[in-house]
Image (cartoon, helix red, strand yellow):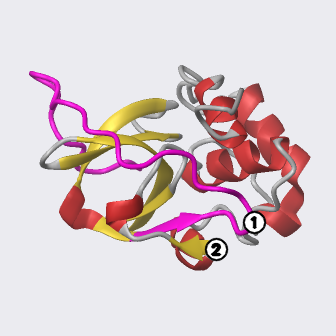
């Protein structure tokens, strides 16, 4: 039986609910991700979970399933040239979505969409690994790992009543 979702998306789902530590403390889980990846992949000596970690989360999910992440993974927009381009009308669960945001970018995994927004499973969304709605007009790039088959296609979801669009994922 063929998998319904790619392995990296399953790895991402397993991390739902992971949170930053409050105040000056650091999450041992998030810091462990940075340590396992190392500064060559992360792109810096990562020393606090207060540093944006959406790219670190995406890199960790790929690394865990044996797919090489982008170098300088902590920089969300570096994911915009990783892998192969995937047109928005070909999106499938697990696609890497890169967004514009004030002060930089944001990166996460496509899990679906509604008329106005992509539903994104990502890290550092409200200081945690969550699924959030991000406006479609903020999409900067959509990518897929080279050599991996695209499983499925666009997933239409309904907008969740009372769930606003995310405005800033930092």
The reply, left or right, for residue 138 in relation to residue 80 is left
- Return the residue nearer the eye: 90 or 114: 90
Q: In the rendering, at what x and y percent does residue 132 appear?
A: 33, 36
Quick check: is 153 in the magenta stretch? yes
Q: Residue at x 59, y 27 (%)?
A: 13
158 or 98: which is nearer to us? 158
Q: Is residue 64 left or right of residue 143?
A: right
Which residue is disc 1 drawn over?
147
Asked if the residue under mark 1 is in contact with the one under mark 2, i.e. CB atoms within 8 Å, the reply is no
* Magenta extent: 141-170
Q: Quadrant of the N terminus?
A: top right
Please tell me whether residue 13 is drawn above or below residue 60 in the rendered image: above
Q: Residues within 10 Å of mark 1 (few under 14, many from 20)?
A: few
Q: Quadrant of residue 98?
A: bottom left
Q: Secondary structure at mark 2?
A: loop
2 or 1: tag closer to the N-terminus: 2
Residue found at x 39% / y 71%: 87
Secondary-structure class at tag 1: loop
Q: Residues within 10 Å of mark 2 (few under 14, many from 20)?
A: many
Q: CA distance from mark 2 to mark 1?
A: 12 Å
Which residue in the structure is indicated by mark 2? 82
């Amino acid at each position: 039986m063929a998998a319904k979702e790619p392995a990296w998306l399953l790895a991402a789902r397993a991390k739902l609910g992971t949170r930053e530590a409050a105040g000056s403390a650091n999450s041992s889980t998030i810091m462990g991700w940075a340590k396992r990846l190392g500064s060559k992949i992360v792109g810096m000596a990562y020393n606090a979970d207060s540093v944006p970690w959406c790219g670190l989360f995406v890199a960790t999910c790929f690394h865990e399933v044996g797919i090489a992440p982008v170098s300088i993974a902590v920089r969300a927009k570096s994911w915009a040239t990783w892998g192969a381009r995937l047109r928005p009308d070909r999106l499938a669960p697990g696609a890497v979505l890169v967004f514009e945001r004030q002060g930089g970018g944001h990166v996460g995994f496509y899990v679906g969409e509604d008329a106005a927004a992509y539903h994104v499973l990502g890290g550092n969304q409200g200081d945690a690994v969550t699924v959030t709605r991000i406006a479609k007009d903020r999409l900067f790039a959509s990518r897929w790992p080279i050599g991996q088959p695209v499983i499925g296609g666009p997933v239409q979801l309904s907008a969740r009543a009372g769930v606003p669009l995310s405005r800033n994922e930092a």
